[in-house]
Amino acid sequence: MSSPPRAQTEDPYLALQSTDEFQELRRKFRGFVFPMTGFFLAWYFGYVLLSIFAPGFMGTRAFGSVTIGLLLGLGQFVTTFAITFIYARWANREFDPLADRLGARLDEITEA
């Protein structure tokens, strides 16, 4: 026979969610992700709007047969990789240590 299931008075996930450490983790995440997302969306839609409303500018040759539009389009890819690199470095330094501590704390709560 197995032992009866343990009755928990409070959901450990909800308990952890209400801690100051979790709120700090959430604040740090949002403090990075929301501004970065806003920046990238503004950059992306700026590119799209220039393509629609300023085709002459986008067709201006920068050098040889390379246009401003092509350079800005390639800049979209560069920006995507740069944001990914910046986020990974930021998360390793700021976000992951706190998330690891909270994960260990949750493991202690659920194993007890």
Image (tube, rainbow, N blue to C red):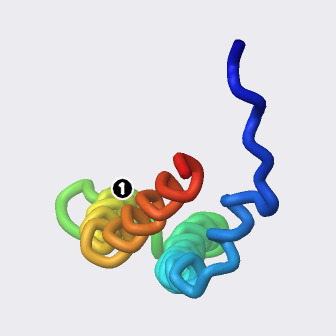
Provide residue 82's location: percent of width, then percent of height.
29, 65
Outermost residue on the top side: it is: 1
The residue positioned 69% from the left and 18% from the top of the image is 2
Q: Which residue is mark 1?
A: 77
Q: Is residue 47 above or below residue 11?
A: below
Q: Quadrant of the N terminus?
A: top right
Provide residue 51's location: percent of width, then percent of height.
57, 65
The residue closer to the viewer here, 108 or 101, is: 108
Provide residue 90's location: percent of width, then percent of height.
30, 74
Is residue 78 in view? no
Provide residue 49's location: percent of width, then percent of height.
63, 71
Is residue 100 in view? yes
What is the count of numbered marks?
1
Q: Is residue 27 above or below residue 71?
A: below
SS state under label 1 = helix
Is 23 on the left or on the right of 94, as rendered? right
Is 65 on the left or on the right of 54, as rendered? left
Q: Is residue 96 above or below residue 29?
A: above
At label 1, the amino acid type is Phe
The residue positioned 18% from the left and 59% from the top of the image is 64
The residue positioned 47% from the left and 75% from the top of the image is 57
- Asked where in the image residue 70 lies, by quadrant, the reply is bottom left
